[in-house]
Amino acid sequence: MVRNFPPEFVVRVDREACINCLRCVRECPFGVHEYDREKKLWKRHHEKCVACLRCAYMCPVQAISIERSPMEYAPHPVWTNRVRKDIKTQAETGAVILTAMGNELPYVSYFDRLVLDACQVTNPSIDPLREPMELRTYIGRKPEKVELEEDNGVRLKTKIAPNLKLETPIMFAHMSYGSISIEAHLSMARAAKEVGTYMGTGEGGMHVELYPYADHIITQVASGRFAVHEEYLKRGAAIEIKIGQGAKPGIGGHLPGKKVTEEISRTRMIPEGSDAISPAPHHDIYSIEDLARLIYALKEATRYKKPVFVKIAAVHNVAPIAVGIIRAGADAVVIDGFRAGTGAAPQVHRDHHGIPIEAAIASVDRRLREEGIRHWGSIIASGGIRSSADVAKAIALGADAVYIGTAALIALGCTVCKKCYTGKCAWGIATQDPELRKRLDPEEGARRAANLLRAWSHELKEILGALGLNSIESLRSNRDRLRGVGLTEPELRVLGVKPAGE
Amino acid sequence: MEIPLRKAKVSREGEFVVVDAKGVHYRELNEVINELVEKGERKLRLINVNGQRYIADGLRCDCYIEIHGVAGDDLAAFANGPTVVVFGDVQDGAGNTMNAGRIIVHGHGTDIIGHSMRGGKIFVRGHVGYRVGIHMKEYREQVPVLVIGGTAGDFLGEYMAGGRIVVLGLERLETYPEIAGEWLATGIHGGAIYLRDEVDEDRLGYGAKVEKLTHDDRRFLEAEVGEFCSIFSLNPEEVLNAEFTKVVPKSHRPFADMYSDAKEG
Ligand code: SF4
Ligand code: SF4
């Protein structure tokens, strides 16, 4: 049967400019450019191109451009090109379609339908250049009230639970060593330490090269329990129990054995070459009571010195679940929205499960307040945070801080080609290939990742100034400073914001 | 009703430090244990233990802890080295994600015993409940061993990635006489389970198969079951002189063909 499968991209090469240096052949990890030295003939395998743009930027004479293929199936609004291609792929393979990065379906973005307020005349804005602006955020349980003791000066009597101190309310999300390279991990770890924030290890353990940054690293305990070890738990700054993730709510994960190299095996503490399977649930957690048991097992193992977070995907009943998590003893609940990125997920799960992070933050924050336990734990939001504006809106909806994953990788050079699961990332990020890894210099990566945090932090200060606020705390859950544009009544109700003009 | 909590009473009996756990909250009890271990005590006897959780949780030491009573959930979870001997039963999660050490249980165990354990040994004289040995793993020279004298409930060794489980079935339950429950070894992709009985292949979960015992398997059983018998005063020849079934994974990559990219090459 004829394989009638048009390529997504075409590689155009300016033959006059091309100097036959073969650089593109070496640069493309997907085998698109092929040169027959004997016949002196070029062949481009357009169907393999993923538009990572590596070759185009490495070509010394800029002879290459990557374009969307003009050849497509006849237009049809329901049977889109993607639908037709997916069906053909599955007809060929009989298998689940794997993909990477975040949800691609055109759901409405609430962030893009929320606008921030600004001061005019009656309440002057604040100039962050003139007045101090506080972005410092503490993540963890806050006391009911603070008691002081007076003898020879004033002393704090209340015992404060361990909190993480963030200089800016933005952290690097959990992406495992294995799904991304050690260079990518190192870049984020250094940036986190430099800026005074944290990064997550993901469930792949902590590589020894990260030990110097361990006080700025949050370790993860996921259902596979890879690398989970008493020293690992004690080494990090906080521990996160991963129940679910926004890119694939409700399902587990498999790191294929071929990706479990010697070094990955050492960090995860599993045999080389065997599949690393994370079951869908933690098999010791089938209830909130079981979750409480694990939370306290981790607190006991670390002598109550580390905050313990619990991460869930934003799903329909996120509010009562989050309340249960906080009541179970978690110091923070991490909510991962349906736009969250991933290194590998079945497309059907990535695109069709979960709810928008904006709605989840608002309902969790509201529910915790209604129950009078908002101070018991922090809310960390993640999944599709693209800019300082998204950070500000997430905080105004009720989050304490955010995690950024995809945005951090883009800062390191990722072009969102969605091929992370192949392990062939052309930019040295989602790969373990020693040659490809050389493409990311952790020094430069750290600089860029730190720059992104600084730029966003600066913008956050400006946003606060425009709102007439001088601390990020005053923005938290301050939904009155948001208005909705083009949102329906029920949507406004869930988000807890008024329509623009009201 | 608030139950008045007590301070743990600590005394000395020969080479043992004795801690009376009666009415003591687990947090206080474990603090006392940790302090004693930090001070260099190596032999602890906990008496009147009545379900206190997390004993020896995350403990890194080569100490010996005796427990008289019922040990609560997550006994020796994340532990790294201690030997814990329980003269009584253990509750859920004994040895959960343990890295090294030994747990010896003279009574029964409930659910998720040895969950995700990576190293060390657990010997349970009696029966165990559901989900035991789920996702047990191994790493280099660390090969965890779990030996059960009685029977095991459903989901034994599910998702097992390494290690060895032995079920002896010396006593059977009247209500369920099988040596192990349903969904045995579902999703297993490493390690092996030895059952001292005949087990039909169609009772196994997805991804598991029965394999013939080799000489090495026999030697392994002689060593581990031998040790089990000497701890619990059983006759090893009698116990070993029986038919064993060995359950292993069909593949170390059970999901290799699940995704379209793998098939494309
Ligand atoms: S996959 Fe990337 S490197 Fe290869 S041809 Fe396409 S754009 Fe160039
Ligand atoms: S990390 Fe690499 S493979 Fe993944 S989307 Fe970005 S550029 Fe592509």
Image (cartoon, coloured by chain):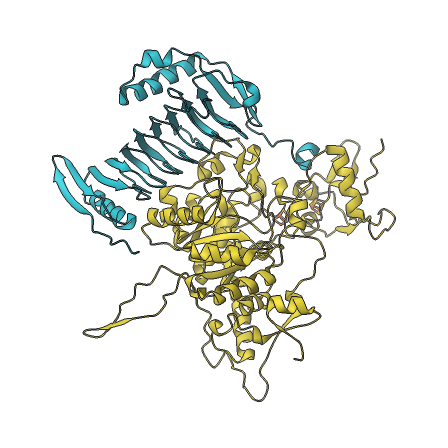
The hue of chain B in the figure is: cyan
The percent coordinates of residue A62 (x first, y second) are 72, 52
Query: What is the tally of numbered marks visible in this picture?
Result: 0
Q: Is residue A94 left or right of residue A139?
A: right
Q: Where ligand 1 lies, by quadrant?
A: top right
A500 or A459, nearer to the observer? A500
The percent coordinates of residue A454 (x first, y second) are 51, 66
The residue drawn where x is 32% and y is 22% is B228
Q: Quadrant of residue A348?
A: top right
The percent coordinates of residue A484 (x first, y second) are 66, 72
Quadrant for the N terminus of chain A in the image: top right
Q: Is residue A171 left or right of residue B233?
A: right
The percent coordinates of residue A79 (x first, y second) are 82, 48
Q: Quadrant of residue A336?
A: bottom right
Work out whether residue B40 can be spotted. Answer: no
The hue of chain A in the figure is: yellow
B259 or A284, nearer to the observer? A284
The residue drawn where x is 59% and y is 80% is A118
Q: Is residue B39 above or below residue A371?
A: above
Q: Quadrant of residue A257?
A: top right
